[in-house]
Image (cartoon, rainbow, N blue to C red):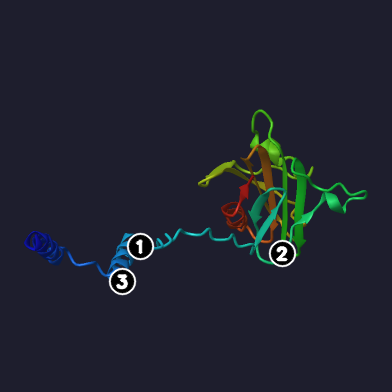
Amino acid sequence: MKRILIFPVILLAFTASCAQPTPDPQAQIRAAVAATLAAIPTNTPVPIPTPYPTQTPVSLVNLFCSYRFCIGHPQDVYLIDQGARRNPPIPSTYDYGVLFSYSTSLFLQMAWTLSGPSFDPQGAMRLIMDASEQFQGGMETILTPTLNVFYHPITVSSQSMLPFGEMAAWQCGGRDFVWKVYTPQDGMGPELLKQAVEKFRCE
């Protein structure tokens, strides 16, 4: 009977000695932490911003801007609202206006009005022509990247300190624009007109 009881005990002890060792809890924790850290996604690198060209601000040197248009003018020239000097004042508006500048060496004047159904350059020029002034020679067309400019010399009184005159007219944004200049010397007008229209823009 004793032999029968001893055999199961020996068998149980042998089975226990062959069983897997008990895992270390600390090792299990370390393995779990390592697996968790490995599963965390890495930070996406911040994309490098793409440089874009910035708009160059428009220089206001020798530039008149108001009434939703800009026009170039010579240095030391200050364009004045002609209507604002009347009594009572009639200031210029978007629809219609007249500006001028005067000195002993130069007279500038320009006007604008809403465009009609058809454009007559000489008719537009008459907006600021004096009664004594006449068109002289033929009218020329000057093409710029954005404008068709019509240019015409005019007669000015020979007694004037500024005996040479030129006029120009063009359309932009639903308005007619007229430009006039008196100069002390012949041939100055085209260069002054070029300076005006090269910087011209309207809204």
Q: Disc 1 designates what residue? A: 42
For numbered disc 3, what is the local secondary structure?
Answer: helix
Amino acid type, callout 2: Ser
The tag on residue 26 is 3
Residue 116 at x, y = what percent? 69, 31
- Whichever of callouts 1 and 2 sits on the residue coming sooner in the sequence is 1
Does residue 54 appear to the left or right of 26 in the view shown? right
- Whichever of callouts 3 and 2 sits on the residue coming sooner in the sequence is 3
Does residue 34 appear to the left or right of 147 in the view shown? left
Does residue 196 appear to the left or right of 127 in the view shown? left
Residue plotted at (78% across, 45% down)? 93
Of 197 and 31, nearer the camera is 31
Residue plotted at (16% across, 64% down)? 16
Q: Quadrant of residue 196?
A: bottom right
For numbered disc 1, what is the local secondary structure?
Answer: loop
Residue furthest left as drawn: 3
Residue plotted at (69% across, 61% down)? 184
